[in-house]
Image (spheres, grey):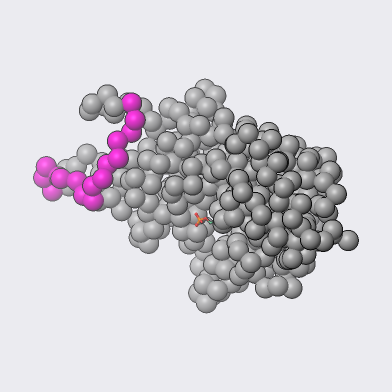
């Protein structure tokens, strides 16, 4: 079956008890057993819940994986992936990651005896050079948040697998509609379902999808043992969201490209980071591993003063963290999503004080462009 058919139907069969077309919200903490050890597959809702199980089956299918696990946030999902490691293990991560992921690695997991090094994941050689004998995990985002660098998932997976290293890809920006890391050779796909999978900015959640039964067994154990599970209602919201994932992603991508092209031509804009633009240095790689380019882009206004003026003047676009909802969000990575990354490191990555990020929504694109145009007018200084 096709992607949309799977999104609408897998895990979302009519309720066998009532025929309800929508998966019920099983708002229960526990399940009655008829006698000791006899139950209907569910014992306690941290361990398993039918609404969550429906979502997990659905997300596994969309990512082309055998096992899916839902978590209470994207961060909880990423934390579970690092639970595959032990004290003394080394992780190579992409140098540009969501700020919260960097913070988890640097300010939580280092204290537990894991070590981290950061590689330029645009370059397989750089990843290779960063590996150590005790490297156990390669963790990458592609495209990266917020400068939209692309990593070659298949080449990096090949390199890692020669050394027995696990590859995890944060697929939040593309969603499985545009990019399937497992099919490209990665071992783990991880998501903040808060974003495109939910799609409506009304929930927080995460997911991990894998193929290997041993890895799945450990993630299942951690999900229950640590307990960062989503509530049934949160799962239901994502099940509702994924049904329209394909149509939303197509529109996000169409609008994203139109906004990127417009900004690229605008005299007050210096650089636009969007993998769908032929000017993106990795456009060809993006085309080869993604089937669309999505709705995320960032651009350089030249200074903090310019960024502030722009962000103060938008009317339709909302100044807010997060992304992937139907409404257009605009943000300032240096002071918002990536504030936990040290300033010199941010500057090195291009997360300057003039960088503005847009999660292009599915409103009429001419309205988004008109709003950006009027806001760009307010910028006091032209970038040099
Ligand atoms: O917010 P949460 O559901 O815990 O997901 C964290 C996360 C993980 N991975 C990526 C690529 C992300 O972008 C995020 C969260 N990002 C934002 C809130 C943001 O505005 O970029």
Q: Is residue 26 left or right of residue 114?
A: left
- How many numbered circles are shown? 0
Q: Where does the magenta region start and end?
A: 21-36
Visible residue check, residue 211: no
Q: Is 255 contained in the magenta span?
A: no
- State the residue in front, 359 or 155: 359
Kindly give the residue lying farthest to the bottom in the view shown: 111
| Lateral position of residue 106 relative to residue 17, left or right | right
The quadrant of the picture occupied by the C terminus is bottom right
For the point 60% across and 61% down, which residue is it? Answer: 337
Expressed as whole percent of the image width and height from the top left, the position of residue 363 reads 60, 36
68 and 275: which one is in front?
275
> Residue shown at 75%/52% (left/top)?
376
Q: Residue at x 17, y 43 (%)?
A: 38
View extreme (left): residue? 35
Q: Nearer the viewer, residue 40 or 22?
A: 22
Residue positioned 52% across, 27% down in the render: 4
Residue 94 pos. (x, y %): 68, 59
């Amino acid at each position: 079956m096709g992607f949309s058919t799977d999104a609408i139907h897998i895990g979302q069969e009519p309720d066998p008890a009532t025929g309800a077309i929508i998966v019920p919200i099983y708002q229960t903490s526990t399940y009655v057993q008829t006698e000791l050890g006899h139950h209907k597959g569910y014992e306690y809702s941290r361990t398993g819940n039918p609404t969550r199980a429906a979502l997990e089956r659905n997300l596994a299918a969309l990512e082309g994986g055998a096992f899916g696990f839902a978590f209470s946030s994207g961060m909880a999902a990423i934390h579970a992936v690092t639970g595959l490691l032990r004290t003394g293990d080394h992780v190579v991560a992409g140098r540009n990651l969501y700020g919260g992921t960097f913070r988890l690695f640097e300010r939580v997991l280092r204290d537990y005896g894991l070590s981290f090094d950061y590689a330029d994941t645009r370059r397989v050689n750089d990843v290779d050079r960063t590996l150590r004998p005790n490297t156990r995990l390669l963790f990458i985002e592609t495209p990266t948040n917020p400068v939209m660098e692309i990593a070659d998932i298949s080449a990096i997976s090949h390199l890692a697998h020669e050394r027995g290293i696990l590859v995890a890809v944060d697929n939040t920006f593309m969603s499985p509609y545009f990019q399937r890391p497992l099919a490209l050779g990665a071992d783990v796909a991880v998501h903040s379902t808060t974003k495109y999978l939910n799609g409506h900015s009304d929930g927080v959640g995460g997911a991990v999808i894998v193929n290997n039964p041993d890895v799945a067994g450990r993630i299942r154990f951690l999900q229950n043992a640590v307990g960062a599970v989503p509530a049934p209602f949160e799962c239901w919201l994502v099940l509702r969201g994924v049904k329209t994932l394909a149509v939303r992603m197509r529109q996000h991508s169409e609008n994203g490209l139109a906004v990127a092209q417009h900004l690229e031509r605008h005299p007050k804009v210096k650089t636009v980071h969007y993998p769908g633009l032929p000017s993106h240095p990795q456009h060809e790689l993006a085309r080869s591993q993604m089937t669309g380019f999505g709705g995320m882009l960032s651009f350089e206004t030249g200074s903090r003063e310019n960024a502030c003026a722009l962000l103060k003047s938008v009317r339709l676009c909302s100044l807010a963290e997060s992304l992937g909802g139907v409404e257009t969000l605009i943000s300032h990575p240096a002071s918002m999503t990536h504030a936990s990354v040290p300033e010199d490191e941010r500057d090195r990555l291009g997360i300057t004080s003039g960088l503005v990020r847009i999660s292009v929504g599915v409103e009429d694109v001419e309205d988004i462009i008109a709003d950006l145009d009027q806001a760009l007018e307010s910028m006091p200084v032209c970038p040099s």
